[in-house]
Amino acid sequence: MSKPKAVRAVISLTIQAGQAKPSPPVGPALGQAGLNIMAFCKDFNAKTADLKDDVPVPVKITAYTDKSFIYTTKTPPISYFLKKAAGLEGGAKRPGHESAGTVTAKHIYEIAKIKQEDMQELPLQSICKSIAGSCRSMGIRVVGKME
C-alpha cells in the first residue's frame, strides 16, 4: 500500500471555458503552489473546449508537495444560468424593490437538473428552492407555479 501524497494547497478559481492563461488570476495562484502552469492551462482548455467561451467554470485544484496536481470542474454558477434564462447582463440594482427580469418555473427546473450534477446529495425540489432564492436575491421574478 502506497503512502498518500501530502497536500500542499487547495485552490478554487472560476475560469472562462477554454480561456485558462498563465496571466492572473490563474498564473499567480498556481505559481505560489509551485505547479506547472502551462500543463494546467493546456489540459483545462482541452477539457472545456466543447463549452462556449463565455461560460464561467468553477475549478478546484489540489496541489501536492511533489508538484503534481489534480483538478475537478463543476457546472457554471446558478447566477450565470439565471442571467442567460432572463436575458440579462446583471441582476437588479435594488433586489426586492425592482425587478431586473423574469424566468419561468420551467427555467428553474431545467437549471436544477443541470446543477444536480454538483449537488447529488440534495433532492431536486431543494435545488429548485435554492435557485428561486437566488432569483429573489438577484431581483429576478419567477412566473408560473413552483410545486
Image (cartoon, grey):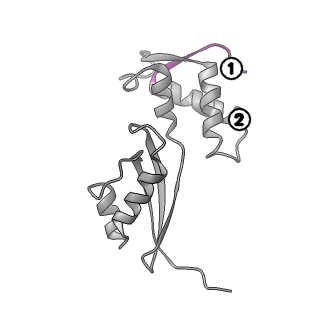
Drawn side of residue 147 relative to residue 17, left or right: right
Vertical placement of 39 versus 143: above or below?
below
Q: Which residue is mark 1?
A: 146
Q: At 34% from the left edge and 65% from the top edge, which residue is drawn?
A: 37
Which region of the structure is painted magenta? 139-147
In the figure, 61 relative to 107: above or below?
below
Reply above or below: 59 against 51. Answer: below
- Please state, as top left, top right, bottom left or bottom right, where the N terminus lies in the image: bottom right
The x, y position of residue 128, in whole percent, is: 65, 30
Give coordinates of residue 104: x percent, y percent.
Answer: 59, 17
* Residue underneath mark 2: 124
Vertically, is 101 above or below 23? Answer: above
Secondary element type, mark 2 = helix
**Residue located 50% across and 23% down the image:** 85
Q: Residue at x 48, y 52 (%)?
A: 47
Image coords of residue 122 (percent x, y): 70, 43
